[in-house]
Image (cartoon, rainbow, N blue to C red):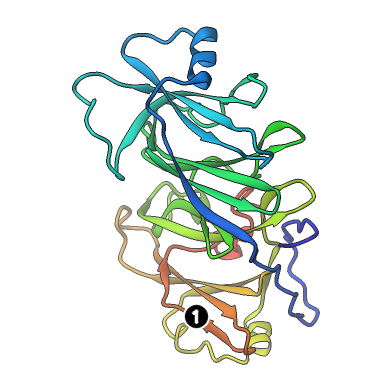
Amino acid sequence: MKEDSVEISTETEDAEVEIIPEGEKSTDYIDDVVTADLNPNDYTHIVSMANDITGEYTLVSYVVDLDNDGTDEAFVLEVYWNETNNSPLTEDSTFEATRLWFVDEKGDVTNLTDFAKDGTVSVHETLQLVTIGDNSYLFLSGTGQMAAYDQAIIYTVKNNAIHNASDLPCYGSKIFVDGEVIWYHEMYGMQIDREDDLPLIESSLTTGHCYIPYRLYLDDSDKTFKLYGAKEISLEEAEELTDLDFSDILSEATEYEFILRDNNQLDVNIATACEPSFNDDGESYDFICYSYFLQNNGIWESDDYIDGYFLIDPINYTNVWEFMN
């Protein structure tokens, strides 16, 4: 785990590029699951006593010990439930959740409004529960019914209070894999047509549902998962840094961009002119991206490309690739 918080860098440096030591993945963790409890219990009783739960809804709970002190807490969901969908649960079962509460070990209730604020969320019966050090983290994941986007919030307990353990938007999947969290930022960006001379980043003439993976590290100081710092570098700097020849992947590129992140990940955005999908008189571009990773043997390697393009700062959309502006 990384000891210090790293802010997103939005400056392009002309100086020699240095390899920044990678934030260590956690090797001391337990990757587990927690299953919803359909039966009434102390936690659902506390919530029902303080809230009006109508007949077409019921309460389910996910009982966990987030601070690992031997006493459980619980997440309680108000879910739509009637005889027509009251079928046996399977690993693929979901609940149509409308409201969410956290009940701490003292029985105090917190209404968690940041998860289902845009409408009903389809939540899986089994959620990911990860223990790192003294704390556990519940990955509350689902699909928004209004926008049909995946969404997830990572919760833990900090200073005896429920804590949103990510400074990222709710939208997009967040999954713990091999010692780190990956946020899949959802966007439509496989192809973009220029619209009324607007910058490409502002065009609504886009197509292709993309899932762009951004890796996070755990900041021990505030128990929050954060994006690695990042900056744009030149082709020459990328070649010097990696000792790689990028001529093959750039051979048909109209424009390209290299982004270096603090976990020794090099993202390569590639835009290629193509036939317009929406605007017959305008410009249109296809987008793909490669990611290269520095291996333990000192060699940079990449998997195949994915559709779409990376951003230096996908939260604030600052310092967007100049080509997009």
Residue 223, x across and y down, in percent: 72, 47
Vertical side of 295 occupied by 140: above or below: above
Vertical side of 242 occupied by 75: above or below: above
Q: Secondary structure at mark 1?
A: strand
Q: Is residue 174 visible?
A: no
Vertical side of 318 occupied by 298: above or below: below
Give the total of numbered labels: 1
Residue 97, x across and y down, in percent: 40, 27
Q: In percent of the image, x 61 and y 51: which residue is there?
A: 131
Q: Which residue is mark 1?
A: 302
Q: In percent of the image, x 78 and y 77: which residue is there?
A: 14
- Relative placement, left or right, of 47 versus 126 is right
Q: In percent of the image, x 54 and y 40: which residue is there?
A: 170
Is the residue marked by circle 1 packed among few (<14), some (14-19), or many (20+) residues within 10 Å?
Answer: few
Give the residue type that dot 1 points to.
Answer: Ser
| Image quadrant occupied by the C terminus | bottom right
Of residues 185 and 129, the one drawn nearer to the viewer in this rendering: 129
